Amino acid sequence: MAPKIMWIGLGNMGRGMVKNLVEKAPLLDSLIIYNRTRARAETLRSTLPDPSAVTIAESVADGVSAADIIFTCLSDDAAVTSTLETALQSATVAGKVFVDCSTIHPDTTSALGKLVAAAGSDFVAAPVFGAPAMADSGQLVAVLAGARPVLDRVRPYFKGVTARAEIDLSGDTLTAEESWGRATLLKVLGNTFILNMVEQLAEGLTVAEKSGLGTAPLVSFVEAIFPGPYAAYAQRMLTGDYYKREEPLFSVDLARKDLRHATSVAEKAGMRLPNAETAQAHLDRVKERDGSKGDIAGIYGAVREEAGLDFVVFFVLAVVVAASAGTWVFVPRFFPKETQLIWRSSVIMALACCYLMWAITYLAQLNPLVVPKRSNLRA
């Protein structure tokens, strides 16, 4: 008989993973879901092809008491710790399996594994690599650590369901307790690669813009040599996706948390992560500007600011629109009523022409139509 599954945490990653569990996993009964904000659980249920495929738990305790395997995918160490402590204290959990897919500090993972084991349950650390779009399409990479018999119980919910691949860190010579922290250690270090990639892209695109090369040739290079995340983030930066979104794909708060964990791990090993420190400074600027809605792709805006450019790519357009609105409202005060429409139209057309001249110059800088040749003459 298939075990009863519960999922706690319906953020960007959790929603996609639940969708794939419902569609592909060997479930004989409805999937129990819980989110601190119930409205998010109800919204997810309403978007599923079969809303009856999930049951919304009224509380963590209610869901855990009815489940055999409990997945958590939460934002930070405090949230995971609080949720698991609540689950262990409020329900009989002997024989259950807790699977944590969150990105937290390795020391926290190890401590939680011991806490779960002390309650008579089994624990699997299973952080995942991938963007929300990959979670939605079941293309994540799962890092699994725990006792092998326990891993075998949860594998049916990863590769081919929520993930396209698995990295097994349990090892033949490691105990479950020794392996748990290794999974989130790999996850934290792996996330520095992603943040370093975003930092390098932001710097490269900004230099290309300011030097006259234009961003289009650099994007062509990225798409040819580094397809996948590099190309996707380049497009997010150039289209302004990093400041237009209502909800970030990879929030600045989570990214800063991940870098703090990585820096802590490096310090414990007796070294620094200079690239991560640079990214951290730019993320701090994104946080200062956009608050909790900041996205890691906003590093591009921070780098642009340092280079003397606007944080947002089309800031000038917003200025022109505001000036046009002001013209429409205030110009009538200075001209006779019969000529107000003419003056309004004339001033707005002048502003529009100025903007078009700027836009043509700006876009030509991004993607030059004519590349100037260097003179052979030497000074």
Image: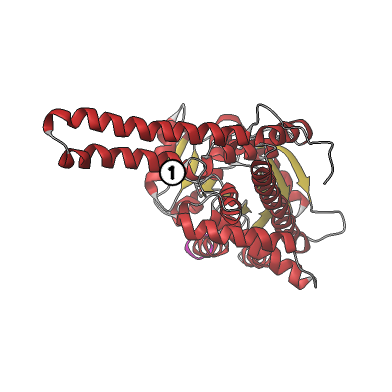
Asked if the magenta segment contains residue 91, the reply would be yes
The residue labelled by disc 1 is 246
Corner quadrant of residue 378: top right
Residue 88 occupies quadrant: bottom right
Q: From this view, report whether residue 314 is shown above or below residue 51.
A: below
Magenta extent: 88-92
Foreground pick, 134 / 99? 134
**What's the image's color scheme?**
secondary structure
Q: Residues within 10 Å of mark 1 (few under 14, many from 20)?
A: few
Q: Secondary structure at mark 1?
A: loop
Q: Quadrant of the N terminus?
A: top right
**Rendered location of residue 327, percent (x, y):** 27, 39
- Main SS of the magenta part reads helix
Left-right relation of 67 to 188: left
Identify which residue is drawn at 46% across, 48% down: 34
The residue closer to the viewer here, 143 or 229, is: 229
